[in-house]
Amino acid sequence: MRFKLDLGRRVSRLQKSQGSFHERKRVRDLVQKGERVLVLCAGFGLTSILIGKLTSCREVVGVDPNLAACTFADTNAILNKCVEKVSTVMGDTMDSNFLQSLGTFDRVIAYLPWKRNGVIQTLADLAAPVIPSIAPGGTLHIYTHETEEALNAGPAGNELLMASVCANRQFKLTAYGKAQKASIALRLYRVGWDFKFD
């Protein structure tokens, strides 16, 4: 595959927020035939195009608030001959009404910023606007920043927070762990969570 990038606009970094190559491959390998996939903070289209090109999903919609990133994502979909399956729209990835206007999805991959207006976002903060976009039986892959202590304590406390924003939807945590092996700062890790919803 080929990707057009622009270092000057800082949209070409393989963002740590999207985890490692191994994390993207792990998620890609979970995509089932006919799924409709949403990628939040899709950047220049790396994950969207990998899924659109290398799986039998029906459609991938990427969302990013950055116009330059969306422009590069569209160009990269053309370069990789997957415009029939992969599209990118500009919008607020934390706006529940906007996300719901895109329909529901069988799989949501949420590389959301861990801070918003200078405030650190909890797992529940990040997930709340996204949950209504997940179809029954759908999966949410979402990423947080966790201290080494929180990571070692396990997911139980955050699962309770998730329950508080799920509007009575049942869910099951199906995977939890580092999205990349190395820390992203001193004793701080990018952690991936997979939730299956009823």
Image: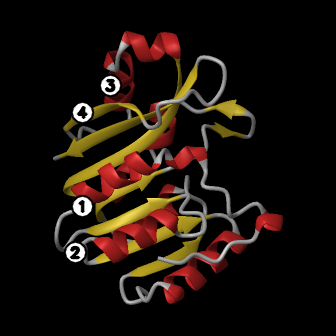
Whole-Å distance between the Cαs marked 2 and 1?
Answer: 8 Å
Amino acid carrying label 2: it is: Ser
| Closer mark to the observer between disc 4 and disc 2 | 2
Mark number, residue 31: 1
Whole-Å distance between the Cαs marked 3 and 2?
Answer: 31 Å
> For the image shown, how many numbered marks are present on the structure?
4
Q: For mark 4, does the 10 Å Cα neighbourhood hold few (<14), some (14 to 19), or many (20 or more) residues?
A: some
Closer to the camera in the image, 66 or 175 = 175
177 horizontally vs 175: left or right:
right
Question: Judging from the image, what secondary structure is the residue with disc 3 in?
Answer: helix
Whole-Å distance between the Cαs marked 1 and 3?
Answer: 23 Å
Mark number, residue 159: 3
Residue 27 appears anywhere in the view? yes
Amino acid carrying label 3: it is: Glu
Are dots 2 and 1 in contact, CB under 8 Å? yes
Whole-Å distance between the Cαs marked 3 and 4?
Answer: 8 Å
Are dots 3 and 4 in contact, CB under 8 Å? yes
Q: Earlier in the sequence, mark 1 or mark 3?
A: 1
Question: Judging from the image, what secondary structure is the residue with disc 1 in?
Answer: loop
Are dots 1 and 3 in contact, CB under 8 Å? no
- Seen at 24% across and 38% down, the residue is 168
Closer to the camera in the image, 108 or 117 = 108
Amino acid carrying label 4: it is: Leu
Q: Find residue 8 and report its horizontal and vertical position in percent.
A: 83, 66
Mark number, residue 71: none
- Seen at 39% across and 46% down, the residue is 23
Q: Give above or below for 50 relative to 192.
A: below
Q: For mark 3, does the 10 Å Cα neighbourhood hold few (<14), some (14 to 19), or many (20 or more) residues?
A: some
Residue 130 appears anywhere in the view? no
* Residue receiving disc 2: 56
